[in-house]
Amino acid sequence: MEITRTDKAVTLTWENEEVSEGTLVFVSSSPTLETNNEPVSKVTSEINHYTYETKDIPVYFFLQTPNGEKTVISERILPLQSVFNFRDMGGYESKNGKHVRWGKLYRSSNLVNINEKDAELLQKLNIKWICDLRSSSEVKAQPTPVIDGVENKHIPIGTAKNEETTLPVTNDQAIYEPLMGESYRVFVQSVEGFKEIFHEILQDTETGLPFVFHCTAGKDRTGVLAALLLTLLDVPEKTIFDDYAITNRYQDAILHEMGGIISLFSNESEKLDLETFRPMAEARPEYLEIAFNEMKKQFGSVDKYLEEGIGISATEKAAFQKQLLE
């Protein structure tokens, strides 16, 4: 199934084998369907899509089969005007056949340029808090604007809270591939940062969710945290890597963002070719694999890293899954 959006409408399209005849289609602006909602369409062999005329974000489609089973589908990538790579992590199927709830976990790129309309969307999504994974120097240089009712917490991954960002700048592209690999190994060492993040979520999922987490591009530090959250929900590794790779749609936007970062944290007067930094803008599966392999090397598995490294108990994992899987 696929969701597409135009300026005036959102369309859900499906293959005949994906949706059984007689299935009822509902639409809502909430990830929870109210009991008084009426169906907007009924699937027949001649109908393979439904178009809902709206400019609103978000939109959730509910499919109810003739035997009463319900499936929720929404947009993976939310079309914000001022922020790229803003995604809902809902809908992914876990190993036991359940699905991650929509409207609970959001990942994003830097929010420094968020405009008023997009800030209002974060409020509309009931996002309780923003988890900023960037270094102190990045936050100081590009602070996130205050959004009423949304708490902003700085929990850096890859650096200590008072540690400055340093970036080697050169036109030699060969330096950046091994640098990326080393960065992912460093992320794994940020156990205290991950502990703090999971503490915020697990201590009280009612107040800890929904939340959005981000770094600069929403790729590396964000990608590792997303992978850990999905692992905790028993989402298969292939799905986790597929989610990670979605960021590749934004390579050019990431390069543009990096241009600003480079100018902030380098003393180079020579103009550099941004294409040199392409390896740092790519969400290569081998980067995330390096992080996973480091966790496995130290703890035996990614699950054990969560359990023994970050300290998530079986009871906490079960409570998290109860809240996030349906």
Image: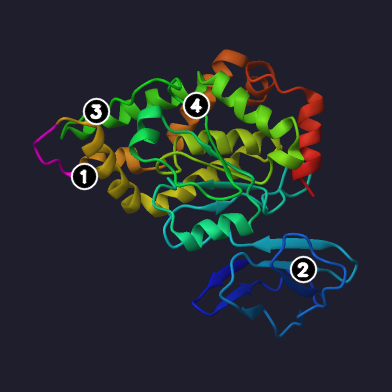
Q: Amino acid at mark 3?
A: Ile
- Circles 2 and 3: CB atoms closer than 8 Å: no
Element under disc 1: helix
Identify the coloring.
Answer: rainbow
* Residue carrying label 2: 63
Compared across the picture, whether 35 is left or right of 274 comes to right
Characterize the local packing of mark 2: few (<14), some (14-19) or many (20 or more) Cα atoms within 10 angstroms: many
Q: Which residues are magenta?
A: 268-273
The dot on residue 175 is 3
Residue at 57% across, 50% down? 148
* Residue carrying label 4: 291
**Residue 61 x %, y %:** 70, 68
Residue sitting nearer the eye, 54 or 233? 54
Looking at marks 1 and 3 on the same chain, the residue that comes earlier in the sequence is marked by: 3
- Give the residue furthest to the top: 298
Q: Amino acid at mark 2?
A: Leu
- Circles 2 and 4: CB atoms closer than 8 Å: no
* Residue carrying label 1: 274
Q: CA distance from mark 1 to mark 3?
A: 14 Å
Element under disc 2: strand
